[in-house]
Image (cartoon, rainbow, N blue to C red):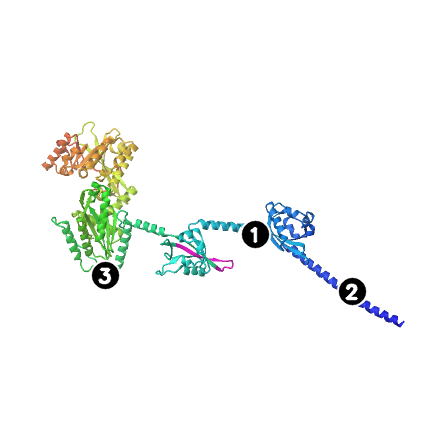
Amino acid sequence: MTSMVQLSDGANEEFNTSSLALKQQLASRRRAEQALLATKRRLQRLLDSSPAVIYSSQPASGYSIIFVSDSVRQFGYQPQDFLDSLDLWQRCIHPDDSAKVLLEFAVLIRQKHWTFEYRFRHRNGEYRWIQDQRNLLFNEDGKLVEIIGSWQDITERKRIETALFHEKELAQNILQSIGDAVITTDASGCIQYMNPAAEQMTGQCLLATTEMPLSQILISDPASLKPSITHTLETAKTVRKAVGLLPDQVFIVRDGHKYTIDGSVAPICDRANRVIGTVVIFRDITQHRVLARQLSWQSSHDFLTGLANRREFEQQLAQAIATAQTAAAQTATAQTATAQTVIPPVSASATAFETNAQNVQSASQTPSKRANASFHHTLCYLDLDQFKVVNDTCGHAAGDELLRQLSSLMRQRLRAVDTLARLGGDEFGIILRNCSVAQAASITDNLLKSINGFRFAWQGNVFAVGASAGLVELNAQCGDLNSVLGAADAACFAAKHRGRNCFQVYQADDQDLAKQRGERQWVARILKALEDNRFCLYQQAIVPVNPVEGSVTHYEMLLRMIDETGEIISPMAFIPAAERYGLMPMLDRWVISHFFADYDYYAQHLLSGSPQHKSIYTLNLSGLSINDEYLATFLKEQFTRHNILPQTICFEITETAAIKNLSKAAELVEEIKELGCAFALDDFGSGMSSFTYLKTLPVDYVKIDGSFIHNIIQDSVDSAMVECVTRIGRELGIQTIAEFVENNDIFLKLKTLGVDYAQGFGVGMPSPLDGTTYHGTHFS
């Protein structure tokens, strides 16, 4: 009994021990199961949250998918779709990628890891790019037991890669095709890339220059104080923005020649904004520089002579005036007080160069009050004499060659600091810098002597030319650019009137020079009046002296200017300036066009009083219009446009103008008479050989000069002259008109002498053609 009890106790203890161990095992198993469950849940959460599709396949299933994560829904499929259809994956591969994928899958068997990209069909039919990564699992015996992989949608990445590729291709194409050279360097300034333009400009190839310092390609002048290209690279990297190359900072050498470039340097930064290199863009501007210099030269120089042109001359003259006036203002009042050079009158027996000697001596005796010569410059305005003879005799080619030779001669006679310019035609301007009037007079005198001694040979002909000049001192009192040029022009004109081959120093108190300057100012007023249409026509009657039935009354058209206030200006005030400065042809055409435009109104209502009354209307032509080769064409166009009967129009020129260019005058008279118009010769008898010209000029009327009419009652010689002109005119079929008929006694005298027509204040005062009464009218 005792032993059984002992056995029972031992069994209980063993049972308890086993029971405890079992409980512990069960608890450990439950913990492991819970841990496994937690791991599974965690893994599921990872699978659910991962954008990648996780799948598995086994050789035992023929490599069909046996598991696929829920992420496959992003492609429009359910996981069960792949379990139910073993070949669904293969059928979803793009046809163009299928063969490649299956081939690579066969290669996969011999590798442990494999990644490839292909297009996978979405359930909606759209193809998406995926990245397929597969890992192979082997057992201890090295046998493949499972393939685990993932699909990652990389469509957006592919789109970005394609866009980047296209951008890269575009950039490459641009770099390959642009004319600018492009070179990139690393952070140390060594070349990494050159486009074809850079290779062509530098004469180097990318292969040979890779890793070469850029400073070996873009060279700096050692003698220059400008920074090297290396310094500019560092500057761009430091300031982190583009830096332009300085003019002539660097250049390239190709084929032994130096070429100038222009460009800029900019830093290249990575995503972290770290500077990793630079890009240099440049272009060859050698030819551009040459062309720019040529254009600059052409814009400032006369093409024919190589001298400065008028534009450049006026700029330099304005600067010279400014510097002279500024310097003079800084001197003492006593130094800036400038005494005008006094040129003594030239005697009738003095030669041109004797006159110049007087001018030089006079200029050198200028009072000592003149400021220091270094404060002053002198303008010389020079006009050639007899140049037109060469041009008209031998043609423009000869004239051009003469100008070239004279320009070279004058350059040799001037100082290096002086500026010689061709202002137009045969006119030249000279700025004599830091030169007193006395010095300028001496230089000009020598210059005129050289020109006078020059002989021009052309095709067997030899010509002598001369020049006249005007000098103006540039000082505090000289005025502005226009004033100085006007003064020089007036002085030059005065020199021409004194006998040519001499010069005149401008004096503000010289009345003749003041008159010429006034004429120059009239030019601007005339042009402005033409622009504003501020001219009007007056008429003065020319009546028959012995009227018979059918006699014709003439009306002469007279030009007047209207100033800005409406006052009528006498023609004697502006006609001399218009004649001297070549404006008369413009005024002649103004008269013709305006009279023709209102011809019917004037003829029917103002002049004749009755449409049936016969009248002839006389229009004056200036001497300059005689040389207008297009005048006849203009007249034909005016007659046609306004439908005017030419027989009612008479054109008139002065005898003096006709004699100056007799052959041209004869041509003009013939052309006008062919139109059907009449022609009159004004101021007849004022010349020494008036009767001779009547045979040459086929005129219809001669106007006897007023100097013979004015004293015809008291002077028997004048009376005889008028009678003689009348008789000769009648023999030649030319009718006579007496001017300056101021009273009835003269009119009756003309009757007895047989004069045909009379004109003057005693017959009729000039009156406005349109009937308008202008205030403040005055006549000379």
Query: Furthest-front residue in view?
Result: 141
Q: Callout 1: 10 Å neighbours few (<14), some, many (20+)?
A: few
Q: Nearer the viewer, residue 566 or 473?
A: 473
Q: Quadrant of residue 460?
A: top left
Residue 22, which numbered label? 2
Three-letter code for the amino acid on which mark 3 is drawn? Thr
Label 2 – label 1 distance at C-alpha: 57 Å
Q: Callout 2: 10 Å neighbours few (<14), some, many (20+)?
A: few
Residue at the disc numbered 1? 157
Dominant secondary structure (helix, strand or loop) of the stretch shown in magenta = strand
Q: Say which element carries label 1.
A: helix
Residue 333, which numbered label? 3
The residue mark sitting in front, 3 or 1, is: 1
The location of residue 315, given as percent across then percent down, is 29, 52
Query: In screen coordinates, is 600 left or right of 358?
Result: right
Mark toward the start of the polypeptide (2 vs 1): 2
Quadrant the C terminus occupies:
top left
Q: In percent of the image, x 12 and y 35: which residue is there?
A: 721
Q: Say which element carries label 3.
A: helix
Mark toward the start of the polypeptide (3 vs 1): 1
Three-letter code for the amino acid on which mark 2 is drawn? Leu
Q: Quadrant of residue 322?
A: bottom left
Three-letter code for the amino acid on which mark 1 is drawn? Arg
Mark toward the start of the polypeptide (2 vs 3): 2
> In the rendered structure, which segment of residues is drawn in magenta?
262-275
| 84 is within the stretch colored magenta | no
The location of residue 119, given as percent across then percent down, is 60, 48
